[in-house]
Image: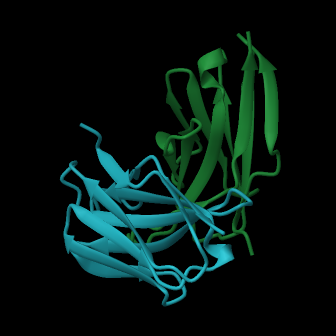
Amino acid sequence: DTAVSQTPKYLVTQMGNDKSIKCEQNLGHDTMYWYKQDSKKFLKIMFSYNNKELIINETVPNRFSPKSPDKAHLNLHINSLELGDSAVYFCASSHTGVDLAGELFFGEGSRLTVL
Amino acid sequence: DQQVKQNSPSLSVQEGRISILNCDYTNSMFDYFLWYKKYPAEGPTFLISISSIKDKNEDGRFTVFLNKSAKHLSLHIVPSQPGDSAVYFCAASDASNTGKLIFGQGTTLQVKP
């Protein structure tokens, strides 16, 4: 019973394709996030949703579209994949309002390779 | 412009000794700092945090020190154990309460038996 689970773990695809990564959390958290870890190993926030409402959108290209059907799920759809999209994508969740930052619980990551 | 920096990409220490991991930040609006630990093929896991109103927080073998004037924090692990070998990320947030964390690029710690 993984707390934050994301699928698939590995994804290899061609440039120009469209792909999705799914994320689910069973912690009862009300906020979910997508982070990207690039080749330089920096973890950078892409999006966050609070109770299905978009809270943070960090100047991510609009080829990336998050979708939150309910507060336990946050999916990431990427259109027209480019080589630079190759990275590890981490889903995370947290409570908000408990303290200022809140501890994030991360999934295991989805490694996307664009050829 | 990287607001949180971990300038040492790697650190190697002997089992039983102290490990000191460092982190610098530039944004004076940051008021909450966290350390995460990451094993290969796993997501980061929360380790310890500190609010800007404190200068030290301790949890077992792990202690985080915050020097606001220097915009510097450090994580001390003592005694270090081989199971502590992992990548350690420093992260910071401001008072916006959005849950947004700014991460450093990580330091790989190797603890040798």
> Can residue A107 be seen in this snapshot?
yes
**In the image: residue B14, left or right of residue A97:** right
Residue that protrudes farthest toward the front in the picture: A14
Give coordinates of residue A42: x percent, y percent: 66, 60
Give the quarter of the image for residue A96: bottom left
Q: Is residue B111 above or below residue B90?
A: above
Give the quarter of the image for residue B77: top right
> Can residue B18 be seen in this snapshot?
no
Give coordinates of residue A104: x percent, y percent: 40, 53
Residue nearest the viewer, comparing A109 with B35:
A109
Colour that chain B carries in the picture = green
Q: Is residue A104 above or below residue B77?
A: below
* Quarter containing the C terminus of chain A: bottom right
Q: Residue at x 39, y 72 (%)?
A: A76
Residue nearest the viewer, comparing B62 with A29:
A29
Give coordinates of residue B45: x percent, y percent: 47, 41
Residue nearest the viewer, comparing A62 with B2:
A62
Q: Residue at x 66, y 26 (%)?
A: B85
Give coordinates of residue A90: x percent, y percent: 47, 58
Residue that protrudes farthest toward the bottom in the picture: A62
Q: Which chain is cyan?
A: A
Q: Is residue A99 above or below residue A86?
A: above
Q: Residue at x 59, y 31 (%)?
A: B63
